Amino acid sequence: MASRSVNKVILIGHLGRDAETAYTASQQSVTKFSVATNRRWKDQQTGEWKEETDWTRVTLWRGENIAPYLTKGTQVYVEGRLQTRSYDDKDGKKVWATDVIAEQVILLGGRGQSGGGPSMDEGYSQEPAMKSAPRPRQQAPQQSAPAMDQGVGDDDVPF
């Protein structure tokens, strides 16, 4: 009997810094950014409210259209999967890192909302039917808003 498993991550948080986009040798874009999520609880002993922030690294493939809008402070919805990798640091010690590989990124607002970027219900999806060929490397971000015709609407956000 084949076993089943699920590797699904959903994050709603704010970007800690502007996203960085690079290109592979085959000119495929890869955008990396970090998302801060907060947890708040009441301490049972002191009665004080406490807050904890977790930082999650996110990798988005072929997202060059939305990358210019992924700026520090912007609130985003990220849906994807976990991927763990290892590498040797400069001292030769093995280091393990877990990242979220984004399949869908939706801008929810925040600091970048009034800057002429995509609206709240627009974003980027890597659903199989929506994949496109890699685009050539751009020299500078486009000034106009990208065409977001993926059909993402308010009903797609799970809250």
Image (spheres, rainbow, N blue to C red):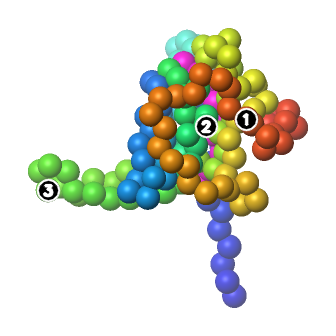
What amino acid is labelled 3 in the image?
Gly
Q: Earlier in the sequence, mark 1 or mark 2?
A: 2
Answer with left or right where residue 159 lies relative to residue 46.
Answer: right
Measured from the top left, where is residue 86 in percent x and y?
32, 59
Q: List the single residue furthest toward the left.
A: 91
Q: Residue at x 64, y 13 (%)?
A: 115
The quadrant of the image that shows the N terminus is bottom right
Q: Residues within 10 Å of mark 2 (few under 14, many from 20)?
A: some
Q: Between marks 1 and 3, how big is the CA–CA gap?
A: 45 Å
Q: Does the magenta stretch include residue 77?
A: yes
Image quadrant where one finds the C terminus: top right
How many marks overall? 3
Q: Which residue lies at the image location 45% right of the left edge and 38% below the top edge?
A: 21
Q: What secondary structure is marked by label 2?
A: loop
Q: How far apart are marks 1 and 2 (CA)?
A: 8 Å
- Disc 1 marks which residue? 147
The secondary structure that dominates the magenta segment is: strand
- The amino acid sitting under disc 1 is Ala
Observer-side mark, 2 or 3, equals 2
Q: Name the residue under label 2.
A: 65
Asked whether the viewer can see residue 24, the reply is yes
Foreground of the two, 50 or 71? 71
Q: Determine which residue is flagged by label 3.
A: 92
Question: Residue 2's spot in the image, x, y percent?
Answer: 67, 83
Instruction: Please report contact status of discs 1 and 2: CB closer than 8 Å, yes or no.
Output: yes
Q: Taking 127 as reference, is 136 left or right?
A: left
Disc assigned to residue 6:
none
Q: Give the range drawn in magenta.
A: 73-81
Distance Cα–Cα, label 2 vs label 3:
37 Å
Residue at 68% across / 16% down in the picture? Answer: 116
Assign a secondary structure to mark 1: loop
